[in-house]
Amino acid sequence: MRVLIVEDEVRLANNIAEALRERCGFAVDCAENGADGAALTEYQHYDLLLLDLMLPGLDGLGIVHQVRKRKDMTPILILTARDERAQVVELLNAGADDYLTKPFDLGELLARAKALIRRGKGVSHPVLTVGRISLNTVEQTVRCRGQLIDLSPTEYRLFEYLIFRPRAIVSARELLEHLYDYNWEHHSNVIEAHISNLRKKLRAVGEETSITTMRGRGYRLEAPEKQL
Amino acid sequence: MRKNSLSRQLIAGVLLAELFCAASFSCVALLHEMHGRRRAFDVMLRGRTDSLMGAVQDAEDPDDNVTVDPTELALPKQDVYEVLSPSGRVLGHSPASSSELLMALASSGKPGYFNFEVKEEHYRALRFNGLRIIDREENGGIRRPVTVLYAAPTHDLWHEAVEAVRFYVIAGVLLLAVTGLVLVWFLRRRLSPLQELAAIAGRVSASSWEFVPPDAVLRTTELAPIALSIEELLKGLRQSFERQRQLTGDAAHELKTSIAVLKSSLQLLSLNPRTAEQYEAGLEGLLTDTERMEDLATRMLELARLEEARVERSESSDLPSMLQDVADRLRPLSDLKHVALQVTVEDAHKVAMPADDVEVLCSNLIMNALQHSLPQGRIFATVQTHNEVTELRVKDEGEGIPEAALPHVFDRFYRADRSRSRNSGGAGLGLSICKAIVERSHGSIQIQSAVGQGTEVIVTLPAE
């Protein structure tokens, strides 16, 4: 999952980014002002936008308007130091999904961020199940028939992204865009290598052909018909 | 407190004036009428006296006496008369009169008109010394002087006068009633803008600042200045309220953001077990954050102090030497940034400003210039006194301030480029503090800037 933080208080943005990377394994990009933030949202790489309300240049509300105007459904969480009711109502009506007032609890921010991403992908429970495999987004664990599969952080993130969209073809480019922030040097064979490791680990617990490669198009997580 | 109604007072005043006019008019009319009637009465008395004179005849007796025979005269019954001979003998008198009345009539010795009163009845009388010539045909006649006393009651006189004046009195009262009603209606109508103004002004409150005086009020010469000054006052108050609200909001925003940084830093550290180095780095960051918060709190308190306390007129400071001290103290910082800091003093006097203020002013201005200077840039700080005015100029060769931002640089918490200034540590209070310092010492502060060329702050202070 990839998150964009638009916050002019650099120390705060770095703290949040660090927590999101450490705790949720998300890729995080930071922008220091509204204009840069708005420009980054146009790529639509993001699974969540975290916006400060008072920003130099373009404020949080302005970014919400821009994003929603182009029918971008990315969940938006607003950070605000002002908790005036009218402003909160205006924000939510403009298309923001949730808000947190500063100073906030970092744990609460992480939980809300995860919940918003889940909701944005049409899932309400933190445990996602496909066939015999279940993924717990809170513990960041994957189990097959109750047996824990030991995955590296990147493999977990890959699998998490795929399990949110079972049976859909996800291109390597999309995976790259959503799993790595722009600071990373990335190549498509990185994805290929991680997918193959993931397959090996799944096969080790007896789960066959769960991830198929669609040549030239991408990857697909297979799921039994009745699941859908 | 008892309230006075302007319209009621006006109506009462005008009605009283009218009433007074009507009463005076009635009195004058009555007096005039009385006077006229009294004169007519006197003429009548004289006429009746003459008639009586005509009735004096020769008595046909040996002494050639005269007598009065009023039988042929038609004199009113209530009238009293007496005819006396020069010797005082009564020649004749009104037959119906009482002796008491006749005595009262005869009491006056001088000829002419006089008044008397008998049994609560007022009389006006005339004493007339006449000459009756009898048998004019023979030897020019016999001269017989007689004194005639004639009196008539005056009670009818007053009644008749009142009767005559009554018409005027009634007309006056009616007119008074009609004009009173018209007046009430007219005043109510004319004073309605006043009531409208009061009603509109009454609706103004801290939550509703709406005050639009109606046209009727603005068209009234006496009310327009009141309405306009209320409008002006409210505008000023509203702006001041909004500035205050904005300020509180901004201060809360800054404080909450600072706390959010601290809290998130702490929570991030405790999120996962860390190495000693990571903890150390985290603590260092926390210390920096805390220092920044401390700085913010200090500056906010400084500003509050400046805005509250009055400056003592007697304090004065040596601006040139203090500027030099501040520059020397900040020189390590400017060396670190590779910025040349140059102080020039030209014939400068002391300024009427507390020493603390001068120090804060100088260090804020130089720090500001330093923060916005590029490496290899220069800062010029100059002081000079000219025509009793001391001028302090601090000029940098930094990136400058966009024209749109210039009017706001003295606003509290304002940053031309917020993210940049945050990184350089400013809370957007430095110039606000400078402005407060300068203004409370009756000086002025201006800023000139061109993007890409630099910024110059000019402070003018009254010299000591």
Image: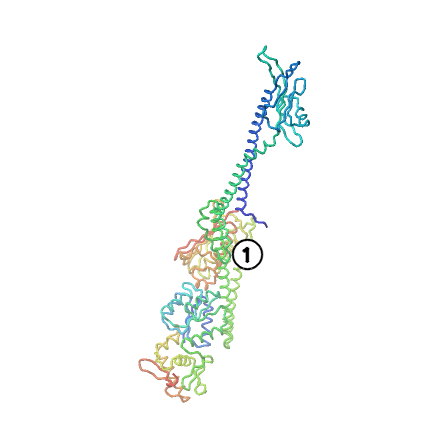
What color scheme is it?
rainbow
Q: Farthest top residue?
A: B139
Which of B22/B314 is in front? Answer: B22
Which of B284/B140 is in front? Answer: B140
Q: Is residue A79 above or below residue A194?
A: above
Q: Residue at x 60, y 20 (%)?
A: B55
Which of B453/B4 is in front? Answer: B4
Residue, disc 1? B305
The image quarter in which residue B145 lies: top right
Q: Farthest bottom residue?
A: A206
Q: How many residues crowd mark 1 within 10 Å: few (<14), some (14–19), many (20+)?
A: few
Q: Residue A115: percent from the left, percent from the top?
A: 45, 76
In the figure, is residue B359 to the left or right of B90? left
Q: Is residue B191 above or below residue A45?
A: above
Q: Quadrant of the N terminus of chain A?
A: bottom left
Q: Residue B341: percent from the left, percent from the top?
A: 46, 56
Q: Residue A194: percent from the left, percent from the top?
A: 38, 81
The image quarter in which residue B152 lies: top right
Q: Farthest left residue?
A: A216
Whether residue A61 can be seen here? yes
Q: Is residue B272 above or below residue B194?
A: below
Amino acid type, label 1: Arg
Q: Quadrant of the C terminus of chain A?
A: bottom left
Whether residue B344 can be seen here? no
Q: Residue A37: percent from the left, percent from the top?
A: 40, 67
Q: Secondary structure at mark 1?
A: helix
In the figure, is residue B132 to the left or right of B426? right
